Every structure is written in C-alpha cells, then in structure tokens.
Amino acid sequence: MPPLLSILIVNWNVCDLLRVCLRSIERARDNLALEVIVVDSASADNSVAMVQQEFPWVRLIACPENVGFPRGNNLALAQANGRFLYLLNPDTEIVGDALQQMTQYMTQHRDVGVVGSQLLYPDGRIQSSRRRFPTLAVGLLESTWLQPLAPRRLLRYYYVQDLPDDQPADVDWVMGASLMTRREVYEQVGGMDEGYFMYSEELDWCRRIKDAGWRVVYLPQAKIIHHEGKSSEQAVAARHIYFNRAKLRYFRKYHGRLATALIRITLLWNYAVQLLIEAAKGVLGHKRPLRWQRVRAYAAVLRSGLPPAE
C-alpha cells in the first residue's frame, strides 16, 4: 500500500544537520505512513555513508555531481509513491505533530495545492517564509543594498506582514525549505524548472501551481525548525551568483526582457559600488580579511555578468 506522505530531501555537505533532520522524522514514523527519499548531491562529507549506516529505512539517491535543488527534487519526485509530496531541507527539524497537521489540512481542503509550515530559528523566533509574487519594484530593491530605501508598504506587502503570523493564510508562495504539495498537483503541472540551480525555484513552482487554479496556504500550526542557509553559506560567491541569476530567470519568464535588463543593470551597479566600498575599507585597515573576502566575492559576481539562468 502506498504511503500517505513522501518526504523529499536534497542534501549537500550538511551531514550532521541531515542526521538531526532524519531523527526528527524517525520520531514521526510510528504515527504516519511515510517514506523518505534523500538525494545527495555529491557531498564531500560523510553524508552518504551516514544515511546508509544509520537510516537504512531511507531511500538514498547518491548523485555523482551537485545536481542543484530543482533537479534533485525532481529526481526524488519521480520515485515518490506518496499521496502527499513534502519538500524538506536537510537543515530542518520536525516539531511535534507538524507532519500530521499538514497532511490533515491538505486532506480537509481539496482545493489547496501547496501548504507551507511556519519556520522557526533554533531560538524559537519566527522566520519569514511566506510571500506574495514580486513586482518589478520588489525585484529592483529586495535583497539588494537598496532595500533600506524601499517604501515600507512595498516590502510589508511582499513579505505578507499585513497578516498575523499565527493564523492560516492564503499566500502566493512559500519557502521550499518546508513545502507540501499533492500528487495531483505534481501530475498536472510537472516538477520544478531545472533551469534554476538554487533559489527562486519554489517561487516559480508555486506560480505555476496557482496559475493551474490551486491555492497556496501558510499553516502556522505546523512548525519546523530551520537552520537557515547552511548549504549555501559554504560557497559565498556562488551563492550571490545563483541567487541573482535565479531572480533574473524568474523575471524574464514572467515579466519580460526589458524588466530583466533593468534589474540586471541595477544589480551589477550595486555590486560594483559595494566592491569599491569594501576595497576602500580594506585599504584603511578595517576588518581586512572580511573586506577582501567580500571584494573577491563581488568581483566574481561582476565577472559572471549575471546572465539569467538558462
């Protein structure tokens, strides 16, 4: 008999956090029919051996290269058997009955195509994990050094700060760190766009799901601890490049080439200015190792030219 829930985890070099994540899932196995599929993207740590030795009930797909988040999830989706399909980051921990809360909500609300849990920092603070679709103004300002200049109402609306954190809410998209969908949705809209490598893929997927007529819901009764960004922080320059190329791919797909060109020029200008500022601080002797690390990262971004992800 197929499981109710398939949990899909794409891992890259976070062995210790993955162990904690799987142990938190293991505690829920007695109360829920589930399967777990871990896709390892050629980790250089002990991730593969750890899963094989400590969690023999986990299905492991060990890739010979880093396949990225969308392709890794698509590999797992293709092998999943569950009625519900749950994308979960390896740097997370299940809290209490979060899995039951999410599956019950999906069962009771047949028009909901995606449910996102509430994400918590390890100290219990709430992470921002729900969004509305970005406008051109958001694309130009959010997650750049210009963000402090953005009108407060613009970002408040984008981050859904006009709605309470402790109540379920219809939103446009939720973070892929904890995103549950249903098999019918996957069969209707397909998997994630593999033109992204990491970042913006869940935004794109949720947009396609909403365009197909499904609701996307934030469910705070389901709580997940998220040790944010532990994979991406291992490669600082690459993180900047992947993030911004993904943003540009999304805007090219949904807002056109002119909007994309404007955002790209603004981003490159931002990085050029910040490189000069960091270099000047380094020359003056202020936290030199940090300054030169940033200079190298920003120079790598500028060399890339930030073409939209293909």
Image (cartoon, rainbow, N blue to C red):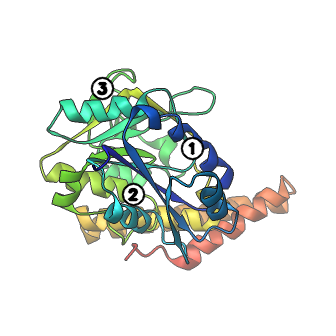
Residue identified by numbered label 3: 168
Residue identified by numbered label 1: 21
Q: Earlier in the sequence, mark 3 or mark 2?
A: 3
- Relative to 86, 47 lies left or right: right
SS for callout 1: helix
Q: Whole-Å distance between the Cαs marked 3 and 1?
A: 25 Å
Q: Earlier in the sequence, mark 3 or mark 1?
A: 1
Q: Nearer the viewer, residue 48 or 286?
A: 48
> Mark 3 Cα within 10 Å, few/some/many (few <14, many 20+)?
some
Residue identified by numbered label 2: 200
Say which amino acid is labelled 3: Pro
Say which amino acid is labelled 1: Cys
Give the quadrant of residue 15: bottom right
Instruction: Please give the name of the residue rendered at 48% of the width and 45% of the height, measured from the top-left corner.
Output: 147
Locate residue 20, reporting x and y percent. Answer: 62, 43
Instruction: Please give the name of the residue rendered at 36% of the width and 72% of the height, measured from the top-left corner.
Output: 195
Q: Whole-Å distance between the Cαs marked 1 and 2?
A: 23 Å
Q: Nearer the viewer, residue 262 or 107?
A: 107
| Quarter of the C terminus within the rendering | bottom left
Which residue is outermost to the right? 285
Image height of 104 relative to 7, above or below: above
Locate residue 151, reporting x and y percent. Answer: 39, 37
Instruction: Please give the name of the residue rendered at 24% of the width and 67% of the height, measured from the top-left corner.
Output: 256
